[in-house]
Image (cartoon, rainbow, N blue to C red):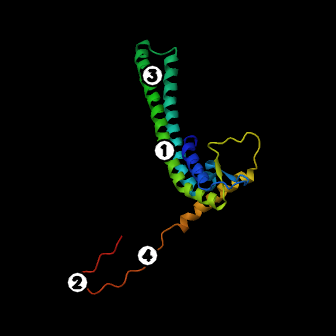
Amino acid sequence: MRLLAPSVAALCLSAALAAPAAAQEAPRFAFFSINQLVRISKKAGAIFSELEITGKNLQEKLQAKGQELQTLQQQLNSPSIDPDKKEALAKKYRDLEFEAKKMQEDSQQEYQRVEKKVGEAITKLAGPIVEQLAKEQKLQMVFSDQAVQVLSWGDKAWMESFTSEVAKRLDASETAGAPAAKPAAPAPKPAAKPAAPKK
């Protein structure tokens, strides 16, 4: 998710600022991966699926338009084409080419809009958990895979452990975070017209 970097980096930095370093203490940090989160968290994955579906639908429309252009191009290049119809066909090709370019621009804007929406939704859910977990582990920094590139080597199990815990807590919040049932209202006193039940 290319455009999620700013929001994810921001939540990671906020977690870092929440746990100031102690003097002479070895640095404590963790690694957070938004890509791993959408793979292993049902909740984050469900949100991310909107972007995947949008991308697939837009790609299919662009491919169909491209196929139309290719078919017209083949007709224009055919030696058996009627000269009287070639100019009209060439105009149709130019119009279709313009439509295809406009569709590509619109598709890119739509994809970016959904990408931003999805990124903000995931960050809103994961941000507080990242910050809470960073405080619990007394971390000074949480690195994001959107902003950091591992150049040589990294302990994969360690790098995935923080995000795995975030995903675990995020999915647990689906049930644990559900509002408790309201206690039953006391029996109403006799009245001419009982109150309508709330929906």
How far, Cα to Cα, is label 3 from label 1? 31 Å
The three-letter code of the residue at mark 1 reads Val
Query: Would you name the residue on which mark 3 appears?
Result: 93
Q: In which quadrant will I find the N terminus?
A: top right
Q: Disc number at residue 114?
A: 1
How far, Cα to Cα, is label 1 from label 2? 53 Å
Classify mark 3: residues with Cα within 10 Å, few (<14), some (14-19) or many (20+): some
Indicate the quadrant where residue 149 lies. top right
Name which of mark 1 and mark 2 comes first in the sequence. Answer: 1
Local SS, label 1: helix
How far, Cα to Cα, is label 4 from label 3? 64 Å
Q: In which quadrant will I find the C terminus?
A: bottom left
Q: Is residue 174 left or right of residue 140?
A: left
Query: Would you name the residue on which mark 2 appears?
Result: 192
Q: Disc number at residue 33?
A: none
Residue 157: percent from the left, percent from the top?
74, 53
